[in-house]
Image (tube, rainbow, N blue to C red):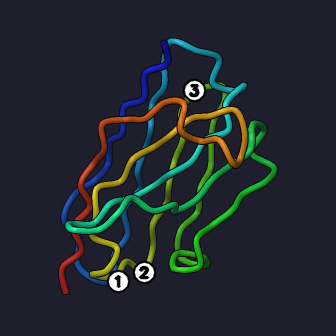
């Protein structure tokens, strides 16, 4: 059973930065396609970014492209999301996810970490 644990969330002013981490255990990290999703109050969970098994291929939602950077360290079994130029509309609970492919990222989920961006 794969376990995902997010960290790094918090309160930041608009224009600031945060780096989220997702530590994994219980599986072979490098065999999973990884992604970040977020859910704002009253809204559905939405895709933020994904990264391929080796890290060579990344994808971003239009709303975060150019501001967020996804990366992974397979030696440390950890996924990252560097978030720069944060906006109030980025406020949400951020979840990391693991799956077998880019289109199947829902095999495993973390518990989420809160990101709040003040204006």
- Would you place residue 82 above or below residue 17 in this image? above
Q: Mark 2 points at which residue?
A: 85
Residue 80 drawn at (x, y percent): 52, 47
Q: Which mark is residue 76?
A: 3
Relative horizontal placement of residue 118, taking residue 66 as reference (left or right): left
Mark 1: which secondary structure? loop
Nearest to N terminus: mark 1 or mark 3: 1
Question: In percent of the image, x 52 and y 75: which residue is there?
Answer: 64
Q: Circle 3: is it few (<14), some (14-19), or many (20+) Cα within 10 Å? A: few
Q: In which quarter of the image is residue 13?
A: bottom left
Question: In percent of the image, x 62 and y 67: which residue is there?
Answer: 60
Instruction: Give the camera-side residue of 67 and 102.
Output: 102
Question: In percent of the image, x 59 and y 79: which residue is there?
Answer: 62
Q: Mark 1 points at which residue?
A: 15
Instruction: Give the camera-side residue of 46 and 28.
Output: 46
How far apart are labels 3 and 2 at the CA level?
27 Å
- Would you place residue 40 above or below residue 25 in this image? below
């Amino acid at each position: 059973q794969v376990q995902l644990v997010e960290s790094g969330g918090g309160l930041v002013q608009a224009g600031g930065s945060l780096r989220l981490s997702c530590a994994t255990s219980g599986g072979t990290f490098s065999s999973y396609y990884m992604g970040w999703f977020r859910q704002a109050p009253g809204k559905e969970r939405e895709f933020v970014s994904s990264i391929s098994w080796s890290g060579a291929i990344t994808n971003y939602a239009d709303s975060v492209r150019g501001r967020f950077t996804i990366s992974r360290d397979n030696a440390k079994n950890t996924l990252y999301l560097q978030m720069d130029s944060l906006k109030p509309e980025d406020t949400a609970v951020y979840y990391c996810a693991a799956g077998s492919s880019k289109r199947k990222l829902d095999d495993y989920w973390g518990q989420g970490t809160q990101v709040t961006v003040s204006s």
